[in-house]
Amino acid sequence: MIIAPSLLAADFGKLASEAGRAERSGADWLHLDIMDGHFVPNISFGPEVVSVLRPQSKLFFDVHLMCSRPESLLETFLKAGADQLIIHAELTDKVADLIWKIKKLGCKAGLALNPPTPLATVEPFLDQIDLLLVMTVNPGFGGQSFMYECLPKVQQAWEWRQSRGLGYRIEVDGGIDNNTAIECSRMGADTFVSGTGLFRKRNIKQAIHKMREGVEKHRKRS
Ligand code: DX5
Ligand code: ZN
């Protein structure tokens, strides 16, 4: 199981020390949300920020590209220090090529889908990806409420992985706190992104520990 605090909820005035705080507190990955103001109605930060953080952190950098034209950014983010690049299924006819390009660059490839997007959209790519990201809010902003209607997708993704003998991780992102993480874990999620639920807690170490305990206890077993 992986817990990935999302830097979007950190103090933007001191991102490096916030990344360090997550690392010292037991985070497994750092989730970095890249928003282009077009694919989503918000702008976060770019590759320069990722490259400044890279030498200061040993965490795996899980880079979530909420961008309309990620094809022009893949190499840049890889060079900046991304360990995994996640692109969105809503880019439809670009998806196959993007996954191929990410893998060709020697990077791990993730595929995300928004709440209104049917799971069938990602089905053709499941044997090519390292991670499936089931968005549990409409992306663009931190601090939104978890959408319970996304849970059946997590369960179906887990069943497909079992029945097809595949190895992609199942990540959830949006409104994840101790309670919703448990709900997702019950359905088969194994990778938990949380911004507000971790960075905005007074004691992030305790929050990560608690989330890990809950998720582990309710883990879906085959
Ligand atoms: C949403 C982003 C998330 C965001 C989650 O657009 O993809 O990664 O940081 O934030 P919380 O955990 O606050 O919902
Ligand atoms: Zn994200």
Image: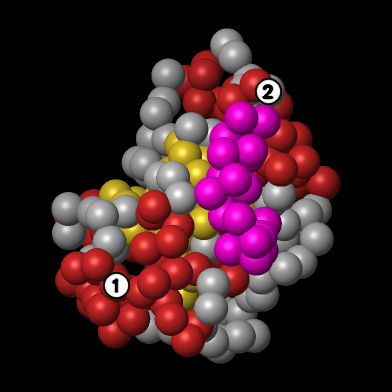
Q: Is residue 118 left or right of residue 100?
A: right
Quadrant for the C terminus in the image: top right
- Dot 2: what SS? loop
Q: Position of residue 177 (x, y in %)?
A: 71, 49
Residue 189 falls inside the magenta stretch: no
Q: Which residues are magenta?
A: 192-214
Q: Residue drawn at (50%, 83%), measured in percent from left and top?
A: 12
Report crowding for label 2: few under 14, some 14 to 19, many 20 or more residues within 10 A (C-alpha).
some
The amino acid at mark 1 is Leu
- Dot 1: what SS? helix
Q: Report the predominant secondary structure element of the magenta stretch.
A: helix
Q: Does the CB distance between marks 1 and 2 fall below 8 Å?
A: no
Q: Which residue is mark 1?
A: 53
The amino acid at mark 2 is His
Q: Which residue is mark 2?
A: 218
Q: Position of residue 72 (x, y in %)?
A: 30, 80
Q: Is residue 131 left or right of residue 171?
A: left
Say if disc 2 is inside 8 Å of ligand 1.
no
